[in-house]
Amino acid sequence: MATGHGVSWHHIKIREENKHVDDTFHDVYRQVFFARYIDWAITTPLLLLDLALLAGMDGGHIFMAVVADIVMILTGLFAAYGAEGTPQKWGWYAMACIAYLVIIWHFALAGRASAANKSAGVARFFAAIGGFTLVLWTAYPV
């Protein structure tokens, strides 16, 4: 991204309505670093897989969490390309947030229970690493 690769420009035309003169239009160009989303589509499922295998989660929960993660990344990309202030942009963002909640649900319930069944040390380590991931992933969009 620092070399200018993996970047695209999203063009938005904003209409400003005026009462006594003709409407004016403003062109806004916004950078979208799509390479970041490609990176996240590869690395975050691997991170979740590591956490799930540490906890000893079953395959169904792992699969659903990874699918929800990929949905979260893709809908976040769609939101980045959405027009500013439209229901489309906020709809994609809302879907990404729902997918994120699905990931949290799988790890908070199934992951914590599976880790507790392994040993107290694994449960503490899973809670620490999972909590750290939860805080970072929640703070990122803010």
Image (cartoon, helix red, strand yellow):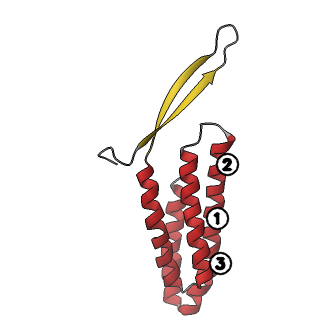
Q: Secondary structure at mark 3?
A: helix
Tell me if I can see residue 142 in this picture.
Answer: no
Q: Nearer the viewer, residue 12 or 110?
A: 12
Find residue 60 and report its horizontal and vertical position in percent.
62, 81
Q: Residue at x 48, y 81 (%)?
A: 125
Q: Is residue 29 above or below residue 56?
A: above
Relative placement, left or right, of 4 versus 111 is left
The Cα atoms of the two marked residues, 2 and 3, are separated by: 27 Å
Q: Amino acid at mark 1?
A: Leu
The Cα atoms of the two marked residues, 2 and 1, are separated by: 15 Å
Q: Is residue 73 above or below residue 6?
A: below
Earlier sequence position, callout 2 versus callout 3? 2
Cβ atoms at labels 2 and 3 below 8 Å apart: no
Which of labels 2 and 3 is toward the front? 2
Relative placement, left or right, of 102 versus 123 is right
Q: Secondary structure at mark 1?
A: helix
Q: Which residue is mark 1?
A: 101
Q: Hey, which quadrant is residue 84 in on the image?
A: top right
Which label was assigned to residue 91?
2
Q: Amino acid at mark 2?
A: Gly
Earlier sequence position, callout 2 versus callout 1? 2
Q: Secondary structure at mark 2?
A: helix
Q: Residue at x 61, y 69 (%)?
A: 104
Find residue 86 and report its horizontal and vertical position in percent.
66, 38
Find residue 138 and report its horizontal and vertical position in percent.
55, 59
Q: Is residue 81 above or below residue 104?
A: above
Find residue 61 and report its horizontal and vertical position in percent.
61, 79
Q: Residue at x 45, y 72 (%)?
A: 46
Which label was assigned to residue 109?
3
Earlier sequence position, callout 1 versus callout 3? 1
Query: In this view, which residue lies farthest toward the top?
Result: 20
Which of labels 2 and 1 is toward the front? 2
